[in-house]
Image (cartoon, rainbow, N blue to C red):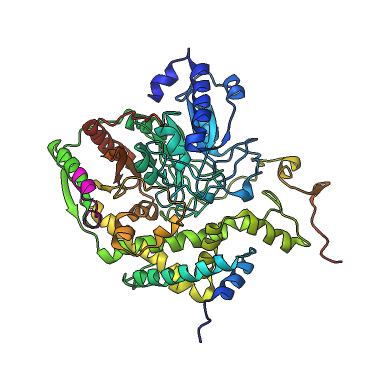
Amino acid sequence: MEEKKDREYFKTLAHHLMFDLSDEEADSIVHEFGTLESQMALLDAVNTEGVEEMIYPFEAATTFLREDVVSNVITQDEAMSNVKKKLEGHFVLPKVVK
Amino acid sequence: MIEEMAKDRNNVESRVKEAYEKAQALQDKLNAVITFVDPEEQLKELPEDGAFYGVPIVLKDNVNTKGIRTTAGSKILSNYVPVYDAEIVTKLKKAGAVCIAKASMDELAMGGTNLTCFTGPAYNPWDTRRMTGGSSGGSAALVASGVVPMAIGSDTGDSVRKPASFCGIVGVKPTYGRISRYGIIQYASSLDHVGYFTRSIEDAAATLKVLAGRDERDMTSSYNEVPDYSALLNDDIKGKKIAVIGNVIKNISNQETVKMFNDLMDQLRAKGAIVDVYDFDNDMMRAILPAYFIIANCEATSNDSNLDGIRFGVREDGEDMEAIMTNSRTKGFGPLIRRRFVIGSYGLFEANQERIFRKAQKVRRVVVDAMNECFKEYDAIVAPASGNIAPFINKDEDQDQLSNQLSDENLIAENYMAMGNFSGYPSMTVPMGFEEGCPIGINITTPAWCESDMFNIGLAIENITGYKDMKVEVK
């Protein structure tokens, strides 16, 4: 049986994405979800039998091997410049093991 | 206009300061700026020469600027100060441009209204009760009000081309890969383009020459040579074959817009263009918005998972790392963003991926194949960029919900421009006329790398309408 797409379902989903939803916000998604299902019906109306997914606009790959030359370097200070809590080049977070 | 300005070496300081002061003076009315950038230091570091020598410009606030706060319109990045410049910032600096402001935008570029920026809505300079459109609304408002002749935006669905229509200016989204995206805060990587606003086709051509080109730090940027777009400008469209999207015209209820558009088509015919109505499959046209919505949200959910408050951005307290991330993301993202992430994540579930995400990607190919079929016969695809002028801002309504309405008018007439993002083909909006004193634009799309053809058709339209270097005095 398909899982019920209610307030609690979307709150759980939000927790997997690491944020919370208020009751009101979760209810809004329940409502929006109905629209999503209608939109899926619009997609289903297009015959895609034998069609390959289009991931990017152009297929031309630009991957290549290059010489192992150091470039575009930032300093440790720069890398840490936006960190709220830091100590000796490390991010400071609460202890996980109490 | 940009070319003349760059040649005028005597008034650099005064014009840059004037732009900076005008942006500040208009802030109460337009709320188009997130961060003002003092031009003083930049003026001292101007290069010897350049196509933008001493030209004041504005950057959308998802463009990383070294040492200057870059928020992408989101509270979670409201304290973020990049340690590097985006490639286009480097190019603009080398050309002598002076950035005076970082412009308002929909949060993380995920919206079409410019009502969701953490600093509040941007207001339309033609009528401040109306929206600018989004997500590059702040940039559009500052070009339309005459503060700067060029502002950078970004376009994932129509985020440059729709505000250009609502603000009465030129809005360009070139071919995918034409302009480097290195240093642009991402929304949906397979659809994101750097775009920009100007008040004339001449300036649009001059700007692309500066911005375009391969960048080793953006693997999606193209090796294709960058032509001299300005030298190629020519409004002779005799024999050019133009396809009008019949599905869009049929679904615009506002007959004033339809008449305005049809009259313009007659004038293009009078200049020798061959203009035909071209009907795409209606079911396919209805599926563009849903396919866009799914692809964009799915990609965004993944792309924006790095916004957690740990390494950069606003960090909220919590008793462990998970709590810090959860609290930072809950307080840092607006409700619309969180809703979109939930929908995107749902589409990526293994159980749903084939039915939702993969299906949308297949529909994307069907749309692009249909465009290619049309381009076998035609040089350009055109339609009104919007059926109506900019809507009023209604504070009591969640106006982004409008984009989910299932009418053909909304699905087809108001949201077809994502075709340009699916295909990556160049697409731009040019002013076409006025209703109730507010502007409305026409959209032109050409095959990949055919920006010159697009500019030439745009120039022909600009010469017909006379809407060149149009700016509005904000009341």
Q: Position of residue B450 (x, y in %)?
A: 32, 42
- Along the horizontal axis of the image, is B437 left or right of B33? left
Q: Is residue B328 above or below residue B119?
A: below
Can you say which quadrant of the picture contains the N terminus of chain B? top left
Magenta stretch: dominant SS? helix
**Quadrant of res B237:** top left
Q: Quadrant of the C terminus of chain B?
A: top left
Seen at 30% across and 40% down, the residue is: B454
* Most distant residue in the front direction: B396
Residue B452 lies in the magenta stretch: no
Vertical placement of B67 versus B315: above or below? above
Q: Outermost residue, bottom direction?
A: A1
Q: Is residue B96 among the parts visible in the rendering?
A: no
Q: How many marks?
A: 0
Q: Of B300 and B29, which appears nearest the observer?
A: B29
Quarter of the view holding residue A47: bottom left
Q: Which residues are magenta?
A: B248-260
Give coordinates of residue A75: x percent, y percent: 73, 40
On whether residue B256 falls in the magenta region, the answer is yes
Query: Does B97 sit above or below residue B253?
Result: above
Give the residue at the far top of this rendering: B10
Res A92 visible = yes
* Residue B420 x, y percent position in the rendering: 36, 51
Q: Nearer the viewer, residue B400 or B70?
A: B400
Write the residue at 51% across / 17% down: B14
Q: Position of residue B113 (x, y in %)?
A: 44, 49
